[in-house]
Image (spheres, helix red, strand yellow):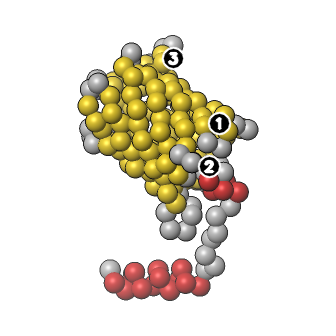
Amino acid sequence: MLAISLLAGSAWSQTPRPTPGLEQSRLENLAGRWTIEGESGGDRFTRTETCEWFAGRFHLICQSEVASATGAVKGQSIIGYDPGESTYTFYFISSTGTGIFMRGTVAGPVWTWNGELRVGGEPMKARTTITDQSPTSYIFKMEGSFAGGPWILLEEGRGTKAQ
């Protein structure tokens, strides 16, 4: 194993290091401390989220905590760009044991993320739309669809970046 590791390290050292591109720079507005207020299933919530660049500036690492009537939940996410698929990537895990992977695209101020999660053991398509209002504000909605059925609103709200 060590020999493989050393050989791989040698090969990588001869290859120029990649540098972040325009796609990664588009993530810059997401970096920082955010307060997200919204509603999910009739319950109001407030989530704080802090996103920081990981070494190399290819990915953002975000830590979040949400307070709602059902209690506090912590989360962690990684946001990046996959040049092979020409999509942004988002992976989220929470202290409740849930996780979701989504792929996203951006057109102007609108981000559209698509993925799948399980609700009550059943697969649900998930779609999140985020619309930048300014560099320090956005609105969002998350919708879900079971078995190709109609899209239902899961949560919606507004994010505000701390100054």
Q: Which of marks 1 and 2 is nearer the N terminus?
A: 2
The residue labelled by disc 2 is 29
The residue labelled by disc 3 is 151
> Label 1 neighbourhood size at 10 Å, few (<14), some (14-19), many (20+)?
some
- Relative height, residue 20 to residue 151 (above, below): below
Residues under labels 2 and 3: Cα distance? 28 Å
Left or right: 117 in relation to 121: right
Residue 109 in view of the camera: yes
Q: Which of 120 and 156 is in front in this view?
A: 156
- Badge nearest the viewer, 2 or 3: 2
Residue 105 in view of the camera: no
Residues under labels 3 and 1: Cα distance? 22 Å
Q: Earlier in the sequence, mark 2 or mark 3?
A: 2
Q: Do the residues labelled 1 and 2 touch (CB within 8 Å)?
A: yes
Residue at the image point whose x is 47% and y is 39% from the top:
35
Residues under labels 1 and 2: Cα distance? 9 Å
Left or right: 70 in relation to 114: left
- Where does the image place residue 87, in percent across and percent down from the top left? 61, 46
Left or right: 59 in relation to 122: right
The residue labelled by disc 1 is 132
> Label 3 neighbourhood size at 10 Å, few (<14), some (14-19), many (20+)?
some
In the rendered structure, which amino acid carries the disc numbered 3? Trp
